Amino acid sequence: MKASIIVFPGSNCDRDIAVSIKKLTDLEPIMVWHKETSIPDSDLIVIPGGFTFGDYLRCGSIAANSPIMNDVIKKATDGLPTLGICNGFQILTESGLLPGTLIKNDCLSFLCKTVSIRVENNETNFSKKYKQNEVINIPIAHNEGNFFANEDTLKKIKDSNQIIFKYCNQNGEVNNETNPNGSIENIAGITNEQGNVLGMMPHPERATCEITKLSDGENLFKSISEFLL
């Protein structure tokens, strides 16, 4: 089994995600340059974090129009599991694979710290190894992580149970004080309606090492591996 990791100019978490995939799944990570026009036979697509094309225009907007994205969109639409982390989440919204958009943090500054998030839906193939309402600690590192959707889009996301993670405190409380970037309803990660595409701002690949006392990201990769097996 293989995982295709899409690499753009400015990607900086592609090696990290490859290490986590190799460590925690049975997938062989393959780096796919953004100028390629097709993805090799794969069981998972990953769009990693970073600052693609320097985050010019809107974050992820240039990357969303790279040649490889035509095949990413096709395969994801056909049901192939697809994971976008941080800048990858931005690219997924820019390409239309996920609803909503990511705008500048309401604090107007770059955030780099570990935050708590609550598992809102553990019935997806990305979250099944977590418990419902489990609080996990995952790092964030972004300037435009403020998820926004209009009222109709937000209602559809909620009605379809597409919210997977919300920012919270250690007690699982979700409110303005536990929201690091201003995301509407504290949203930290969502899926598409079919559930095969996940976008999230926190970095699970940076929480897969007990030496750093951050291992709560492991179950995301174990969830994917269990589903694919």
Image (spheres, helix red, strand yellow):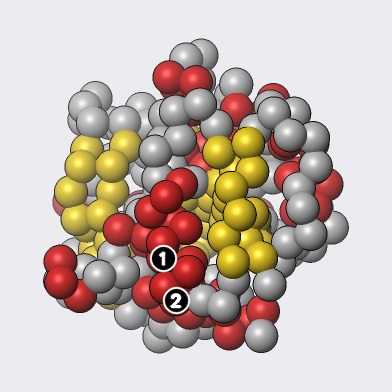
* Marker disc for residue 24: 2
Q: In this view, does 171 lie to the left or right of 133?
A: left
- In the depicted structure, whether residue 14 falls above or below residue 160: above
For the residue pair 39 and 141, the one nearer the viewer reads as 39
Residue 20 image label: 1
Identity of the residue drawn at 36% across and 27% down: 104
Res. 171 image quadrant:
bottom left
Q: Nearer the viewer, residue 165 or 77?
A: 77
Comparing 128 with 14, the one in front is 14
Residue at image point 84% right, 58% down: 78
Quadrant position of residue 4: bottom right
Q: What is the CA distance from the residue labelled 2 to the residue labelled 1?
A: 6 Å
Q: Position of residue 83 (x, y in %)?
A: 57, 56
The reply to whether callout 2 and callout 1 are in contact (CB within 8 Å) is yes
Residue 179: x percent and y percent? 25, 49
Residue 47 visible, this angle? yes
- The amino acid type found where label 2 is placed reads Leu
Total numbered circles: 2
Q: Quadrant of the C terminus?
A: bottom right
| Amino acid on which disc 1 is placed | Ser
Mark yes or no: residue 184 visible.
Answer: no
Left or right: 155 with respect to 57? right
